[in-house]
Amino acid sequence: MILKPQLEDLKHIGYYLGKLIIGLGFVMFVPFILGLSLKEFKPAFDFLIGAQITLLCGLILTWACYTERDLNWMQGMVTVALAWLAAMALSAIPLYWSGHYKSFLDACFETMSSFTTTGLTLAQDIDHFSYAHNLWRHLVSFMGGQGITVVALALFVKGGSGGFKMYAGEGRDEKILPNIIGTARFIWLISIVYLILGTSALGITGLMIGLKPFNAFFHGACIFMAGYDTAGFAPQSQSVLYYHSFLFEVITIIIMVLGAINFNLHYQLWKGNRREIWKNIETRTLLMSVMLTFFIVAAGLHKLGVYQNALIMLRKGFFQLMSGHTGTGYMTIYARQFIEEWGDLALAGLIIAMALGGCACSTAGGIKMMRIGIIFKAFKEDLKRVVLPESAIVVEKFHHIRAIFIDDKHVRAASLITISYITLYIIGALVGVWCGYPFLDSLFESTSAAANVGFSCGITDTGMPVILKLTYIIQMWAGRLEFMSVFALIGFIVAAIKGKR
């Protein structure tokens, strides 16, 4: 029998949702201050009003739903799922007022894309965005990469079991440190340190290629935030192609790889445990996957003679491959070149790379290397059982920080999420076909949205059907939260409608 949610459930969800919204409201003062300092008074006013609306919504929720009790699993999951939808709508307010979006839905698409570190955009005339609005697009992706809950836990929301339930609801189930607050603060510590280093490296490179000092470091900060958090937004419409710099591309690849690595692995490296990077199942699986998918891409490009020589093919092909595999979506080619020049084989290799994604507990999307590695290990174990005598004892294990023996629980969880992602990719592709786009184009765009990549072959545009915009928003949301919170919200709604007291 399904039980109907009680008023207490709604109060707990509302209170913690309000807390998360208040945190978002305070962050809006960052672009507000930048706008004022640069005398961008209209953009600054947009963020001032947006912050006030957001803070008011959060304060009303926390006042009306005040509670001192912790969240249970269902409440934590539902809170996270709703928080991302609320953050999308509230963060879209100042962007919509910028005048660079045809509708509020387009602005919501932009903020969901940013929060989920996807990078698909419906913005018009990005090259003439104000600094404040451009910063917001990238700052939102920086928050979304670490996680809205991680932001709140690191700053002001209490920890405890409820804190971990919200943390896990964002698609993460690894506590790097014993305390969830410590875990959240460590994630932000390494992110801030990398932000300083990455912005410096990109800023200096920007100076070398002729950008003015402020623009060089502003672009550096934006590219780092969207690169490390595998979001793919850029302050210029040409993405990384705008800079025409091999050094800039190399630094960007390093940043993308750092963003696609498990935060727990970062912690091990910071502790000096460098052997972990060679032993870990995720880094090994990622290396094999990159090699395999790049071979497919290179074979497709070579067959069609897309690029003049191997060096150009390596530079263009490998950058796009790594950008897709890490779930970043930075491009050094134009969108339609994927369809008109790359050909089906290279495109298939890129789609596979996007679908697989980066590492678990990272800023990357997709199925994740942990699950692929576990499924491969399980397949290997079953194959051994078939080949070896019945009396043989077959045991497979994998290394992730420590040696872990594979059991049915690991395989079932990995398979469930993998099937969910593949289903989401196919559903989005079918919606695209229904809207009149070719299947391969639709599959490419759908995989990019659901795996939170941000590559586009030209479908994502202000003129695409509303049903497709909504489909991609749902795909980005479900893919970023890795389904569990979304399933919990659906179950909660069904229980509210059909449940019995």
Image (cartoon, rainbow, N blue to C red):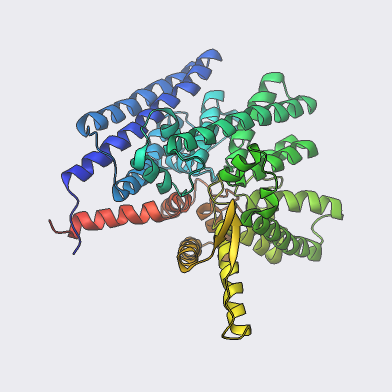
Q: How many marks?
A: 0
Specify the quadrant that holds the N terminus.
bottom left
Q: Which quadrant of the view contains residue 230?
A: top right
Question: At 49% across and 61% down in the image, what residue appears?
Answer: 421
Q: Quadrant of the C terminus?
A: bottom left
Q: Residue furthest left?
A: 501
Residue found at the far right of this picture: 309
Residue 88 appears in view: yes
Residue 339 pos. (x, y %): 66, 58
Can residue 137 be seen here? The reply is: no
- Percent coordinates x, y for residue 496 in the rendering: 20, 54
Q: Residue at x 48, y 16 (%)?
A: 41
Give x and y (percent) for residue 61.
25, 32
**Which of the 4 image quadrants contains residue 18?**
top left
Give percent across and percent down for residue 474: 42, 52
- In this rendered view, identify the residue nearer to me: 397 or 38: 397
Identify the residue at horizontal 70%, vertical 39% (top origin): 252
Question: 195 and 166: which one is in front?
Answer: 166
390 or 25: nearer the eye?
A: 390
* Residue 358 located left or right of residue 156: right
